[in-house]
Amino acid sequence: MPAKLDPDTRETTLATLQDGGWSVVEGRDALHKTFKFKDFSEAFGWMTRVALLAEKMDHHPEWSNVYKTVEVTLTSHDVGGLSERDVKMAQAIDEMA
Amino acid sequence: MPAKLDPDTRETTLATLQDGGWSVVEGRDALHKTFKFKDFSEAFGWMTRVALLAEKMDHHPEWSNVYKTVEVTLTSHDVGGLSERDVKMAQAIDEMA
């Protein structure tokens, strides 16, 4: 099981992700980002790629979709907060968007 | 553009859907249902089938997914409430689940 983010690296790691549009969810140790696409087809196509990655990593986002908008929240339920897996997934998701 | 649901048929149509687990969202003219699956793979596989249908019908759900749970909300933004398209989509979605 991955540990929570190391306090020493946490600050710099989160700062980098926040520069990239991720924000820490108020009242939860979780990351959130809104992704906008051209239309539903593009949005869901992207979701499908993220779903394949999520299944491969055995780490799944909380997410919602309304037409061309996808809201993604990442956290590690098993450690009760952000872990290295969330950071890796956030980076991989950004690369696909 | 499809019209809002005919008041005469609305009551019986919604009653049937409510028997099937759909509920009218408080404060919105929209339908909601929670779907539970075995795991993420099954949940997202089902979402993919619904996405193909949505694109074909040019009518898209508002939905969210957390692991094996999918929350679906249906409404017709263009008519500001429930239309025949929502009823058709609710029925089709149920058949796929």
Image (cartoon, coloured by chain):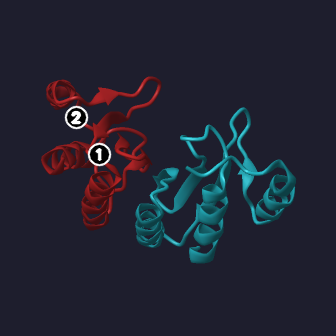
Chain colours: A red, B cyan
Which image quadrant for residue B15?
bottom right
Q: Cα distance, mark 2 to mark 1?
A: 8 Å
At horizontal 33% and vertical 57% (from top left) the residue drawn is A44
Instruction: Give the farthest residue toward the front.
Output: B1
> Relative to B54, is B23 on the left or the right?
right
Residue B17 seen anywhere in this rendered image of the structure: yes
Q: Quadrant of the N terminus of chain A?
A: bottom left
Residue located 66% across and 51% down the image: B83
Q: Chain of mark 2?
A: A
Q: Is residue A10 left or right of residue A70?
A: left
Between A46 and B16, the one lying in front of the other is B16
Give, as a three-letter code, the residue at label 1.
Ala
The residue wearing badge 2 is A6
Residue at the (41%, 47%) spot, across then down:
A67
Is residue A74 visible in the rendered image? The answer is no
Counting from the top left corner in percent of width and height, residue A68 is at: 35, 45
In the displayed structure, would residue A50 be above or below residue A75? below
Chain letter, disc 1 residue:
A
| Disc sitting over residue A3 in the figure | 1
Q: Relative to B47, does residue A60 appear above or below in the rendering? A: above
Q: Is residue B78 left or right of residue A90?
A: right
Query: How crowded is the residue under tag 1: few (<14 C-alpha within 10 Å), some, or many (20+)?
Result: some
What kind of element bears circle 2? loop
